[in-house]
Amino acid sequence: MNSGKSSMSFKAVILAGGSGERFWPLSTPERPKQFLRVFGGESLIRQALARLDGLVASEDAFVVTTKSLVAATRKELPEVPKGNIVGEPMRRDTGAAVALGVGLAAGGADPVVGFFSSDQMVAKPKEFRKVVSKAVTIARRKQVIVTLGIKPTYPATCFGYISPKTRTFVEKPDAKTAKQYVKAGYLWNAGMFIARASTFRGAFAAHAPELSCLTSSTNHLAALYSKLPKISFDYAVMEKAKNVEVVPGDFGWDDVGSFAAFDKYFPHDVRGNVREGPCTVVEAEGNICVARSARISLLGVKNLVVVTTPDAVLVADKSRLTEIKRLFAK
């Protein structure tokens, strides 16, 4: 990340309020997914900052995280000024996080502000920067919220979709509807939004006035947050806003949303098993073994995910990885 004279033209906010559930027990509330050094060598949050290099100077990069993760985030991203990394006193979903990001990054000015996730992967960062630059140009010229739409590689049911024609957002569909969306040219909603600060403020005032206070002040957060609703930016603003534009992107985006990502990014043995760490596999097929402490030994089983850490053990059916959060409801 280059450092240089601060520019009022574009500020980038990384949203980093993960709870550590989807990759438990590798990730925990104290060290959630964005800190994992599993995919690509560096932590996901460091990759998120690195791919913005050339678009923003380090002093124009900001992070909205949770209060308990501020110290760890500052340690992971030492080039970002300490004052640019702010912790929410409690989780209120992305609606509050985006509103706070506007107030944090813009202050009393009106730059273009972009919001990006801390826990995704991008295989083609150069292409990513081109798409973001295009979105910034549009946002600077017009009073619109620009979102980056990802060309689907399969009819996913775990993502929201965007219609490039009607510019409307639709939530996670069932399998049949997802196929129809892909056939109709809908794009995945990757949760990246770019607009002038004044455009964001206007959108919050019109569609989520209860969150507007955060767009102009980052003081007294504990008192403010205790009164805020828990709602995503998609629900609070994007599903209601009419001044939306979509820029399609094909830059190798991956949500890496579950342990299934190990099948994509790690080599397999002759029986289709992924093994990281001390793993013994006999007459077993299609398993994911991640041994960070005790050795894993599998005999005659199929399609399991088995993870060991010094504190916990996970054994799950691969087909049910999206349900891991249920373990935290017990």
Image (cartoon, grey):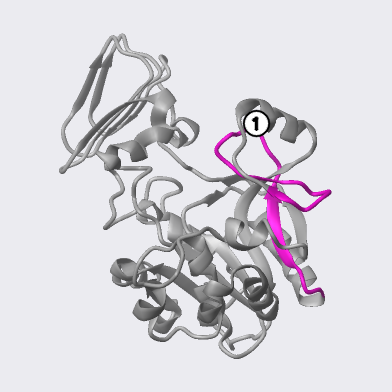
Quarter holding the C terminus? top left
Measured as percent of width and height from the top left, residue 254 is found at 56, 44
* Mark 1 residue element: loop
Give the labeled residue for mark 1.
Answer: 155
| Residue 157 inside the magenta-drawn segment | yes
Eyeballing the image, is 114 above or below 264? below
Q: Is residue 238 visible?
A: yes
Q: Residue at x 64, y 68 (%)?
A: 207
Eyeballing the image, is 307 above or below 39? above
The secondary structure that most of the magenta stretch takes on is loop
- Pick whichever, 65 or 97, lies toward us: 97
Q: Is residue 58 visible?
A: no
Measured as percent of width and height from the top left, residue 172 is found at 59, 40
Which corner quadrant of the image does residue 275 belong to? top left
- Pick whichever, 205 or 53, lies toward us: 205
Measured as percent of width and height from the top left, residue 224 is found at 41, 78
Which corner quadrant of the image does residue 312 belong to? top left
Q: In the rendered structure, which amino acid carries the disc numbered 1?
A: Pro
Measured as percent of width and height from the top left, residue 299 is found at 24, 12
Which range of residues does the magenta coloring cover? 142-169
Count how many numbered circles sit on residues in the image. Answer: 1
What is the crowding at mark 1: few (fewer than 14 residues within 10 Å), some, or many (at least 20)? some
| Residue 182 inside the magenta-drawn segment | no
Q: Residue at x 65, y 31 (%)?
A: 155
